[in-house]
Image (cartoon, grey):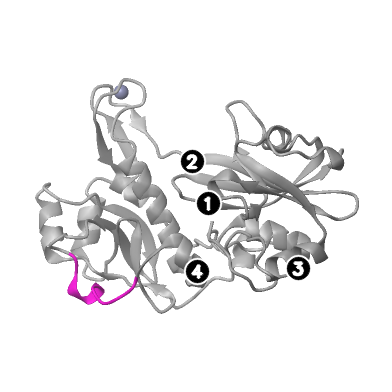
Amino acid sequence: MSAEQPKLDDVFGQTPLGILPLSRGTADRNCMAREELDFLNRVLADERTRALIMVEHRAPVDGGELALVPVPAQIVFQYNQNNCDYQLVYLGKAGGADVVLIPMEPESPHLPDSLQQLPWLGLRDIAAALDDDSAGFFVEALAIHQWLENSAFCPRCGSSTTVVASGWVRTCDREGRQIFPRTDPAVICAIVDDTDRILLGAAARWGGTRFSTLAGFVEPGESLEGAVVREIKEEANLDVADPQYLGSQPWPFPRSLMLGFTARALNPEQAEADGQEILAVRWFSKAALAEEVSTGRIQVPGQSSIARKLIEHWYGGPLPEATTLEN
Ligand SMILES: [Zn+2]
């Protein structure tokens, strides 16, 4: 989208996992300006402003970019009348133009004709193939939109709320206090042993043949390292030591931030699935994993996931081609 793409390594620095598919958002979110009163009215008055239209969490894609369109005039009119059918959110700047999210329904009368013929894709389907700005805006849009969808009421007193700050804050209609978007941290870990094997687990919700790294949410009052040790004990009955941070990416399904780790198993032969969340755990050598994946006997997580990057970081490069399921 923008003429000058920043080099992501220069912006974020090097991490062991490198730049992850959903961590490429470098657009200026313009977060001070978006809090100003009537900021969105001014943005909508600028004919350079572009809209990202999202329908049921899918976005129109044209080549390797999101297809952005001028804001439909009727929506600008509605917004200025304080009678807008849509929950607009300011996303930031791309190539000098402001970008606004407009979530719509499939039957919306304001869906632009120019988008009807394009493929509408979900973030997991397309993230790895999008350019950096598009991937960043899609992740941001999906995350903030789902917060708005799921946070209509004040979590303390249950009253209704009003959206302010161009979509980024709610205020409680009774108490007047501000309510900000939330993100749930989750740890995900490549467990290795002293013979350079990796432990992968088959989650019940994926049917038992898709093997991935173990993961879990950080609990209140817990450190990231503490969450790694606890989750692996719970899911695989393993004691691990020396959790090392490798990189992170947002995972807006609906609001996780995945923090990637590796850790060393202290008692590898005790590995045992919990039988509930995880149906089976297995140690894989590099040769064994390559064989199982390439023959299709097991599946591994999709290209957009940090799990895939953790496995490939241990493996030392891309896994052989095979059928994969996106995660
Ligand atoms: Zn309240």
Residue 56 in the image, given as x and y percentages of width and height: 30, 56
**In the rendered view, would you say 94 is above or below 202?**
below
Q: Nearer the viewer, mark 3 or mark 2?
A: 3
Disc 4 target residue: 132
Task: Name the residue rendered at 90%, 54% in the picture.
Answer: 195
Contact, mark 3 vs mark 2 (Cβ under 8 Å) = no
Q: Nearer the viewer, mark 3 or mark 1?
A: 3
Q: Quadrant of residue 54?
A: bottom left
Disc 3 target residue: 291
Task: Name the residue rendered at 33%, 50% in the picture.
Answer: 34
Contact, mark 4 vs mark 3 (Cβ under 8 Å) = no
- The part of the chain drawn in magenta is 111-119
Disc 1 target residue: 250
Contact, mark 4 vs mark 1 (Cβ under 8 Å) = no
Which is the main secondary structure of the residues drawn in magenta? loop
Apparent side of residue 232 relative to residue 267 in the rendered image (left or right) = left
Contact, mark 2 vs mark 1 (Cβ under 8 Å) = yes
**In the rendered view, would you say 150 is above or below 282?**
above
For mark 4, give the secondary structure: helix
The three-letter amino acid code for the residue at tag 4 is Asp
Looking at marks 2 and 4 on the same chain, the residue that comes earlier in the sequence is marked by 4
Disc 2 target residue: 183
The three-letter amino acid code for the residue at tag 3 is Glu
Apparent side of residue 316 relative to residue 213 in the rendered image (left or right) = right
